[in-house]
Amino acid sequence: VNGKIVIPVVVNVLYRTVAENISDAQIQSQIDVLNKDFTATNPDFANVPAEWSGIKANVDITFELVKINRKATTKTSWGTRDAMKSTKKGGLDPTTPSTTLNFWVCTIGGGILGYAQFPGGSSATDGVVCDSQYVGVTPNSGASYPYNLGRTATHEVGHWMNLRHIWGDASCGNDLVADTPVANTSNFGVPTYPYVSTCLPAHNEMTMNYMDYTDDRGMYLFTNGQKSRMSAIFVSGGARSAFGI
Ligand code: ARG
Ligand code: ZN
Ligand code: CA
């Protein structure tokens, strides 16, 4: 990667209730969180335990809000089968997905906070989805504790940039990143450090990684290995090289 990676973002809001029609300020607060988390300027970055001070990353990617689309709907929940990404299905088609991160805000349902498409998939469904209750930062409006600090989007954008869950979606699984410690499974809440893994050899799990499932206030870093994996998709030959960096 030669130049700076700046990701244009189009936000597509689908709403039935007033609360679902989150404000421009709430959306901007989410963009601000992404910019902090991906440049290591989030205040809690300082809380990364010393054992990982050598691998905690400034991913050095920024986000620019270019447009907010809004559409009223009668749907009470959208599920996870991409209907929100299709105008024909009552949602909103993505805007130039090869060079834009499309971000849908709607009620997903089923307790799902968000979901994302990995690089290499269909452009018609490319982007991230976050439930309207978990976009942006309290107290601007209604982001709901303990997912009220915009980290659902940070996690989903991590997936969109090719990151796997830190536990590799298997018991002591592989996340394809060398410097993230093996984890037994997903962690929730805010585990007390050190959280000793049951995976051998003995080590501490990095429960504060954005790609775990902890509460928003319990997640605050990407590693250098994750940065390399994310950056790789934007270079020539990478799945998102059209972003033109
Ligand atoms: N894909 C995850 C889910 O909806 C998102 C987890 C986000 N975690 C968070 N602390 N915001 O289940
Ligand atoms: Zn995930
Ligand atoms: Ca790893």
Image (tube, rainbow, N blue to C red):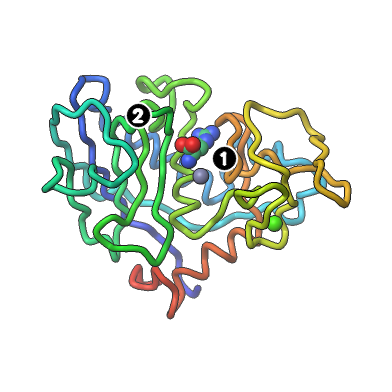
SS at mark 1? loop
Amino acid type of the residue tagged 1 in the rendering: Asn
| Disc 2 residue type (three-letter) | Gly
Position of residue 209 in the picture relative to residue 101 (left or right): right
- Residue at the disc numbered 2: 109
Residue occupying the point 41% across, 71% down: 239
Is 71 left or right of 161, judged from the image as shown? left
Q: Classify 192 as above or below 81.
A: above
Q: Indicate which disc, 2 or 1, sits on the residue closer to the N terminus.
A: 1
Percent x, y of residue 65 = 30, 47
Q: Compare residues 201 and 98 and report the one nearer the observer.
A: 201
**Ligand 3 quadrant assignment:** bottom right
Is the residue 209 above or below the residue 6 in the image?
above
Q: Name the residue carrying label 1.
A: 42
Between the C-alphas of marks 2 and 1, the distance is: 29 Å
Rendered location of residue 93, percent (x, y): 18, 51
Image point 56% across, 54% down: which residue?
164
Q: Where residue 201 sits in the image (x, y, percent)? A: 88, 52
Q: Which of the two residues, 81 or 9, is positioned nearer the viewer here?
A: 81
Label 2 CB sits under 8 Å from any ligand 1 atom: no
Depth check, mark 2 against mark 1: the one in front is 2
Q: Is residue 117 left or right of residue 93?
A: right
Displayed quadrant of residue 18: top left
Given residues 172 and 60, the one toward you in this image is 172
Question: Ligand 1 within 8 A of label 1's CB?
Answer: no
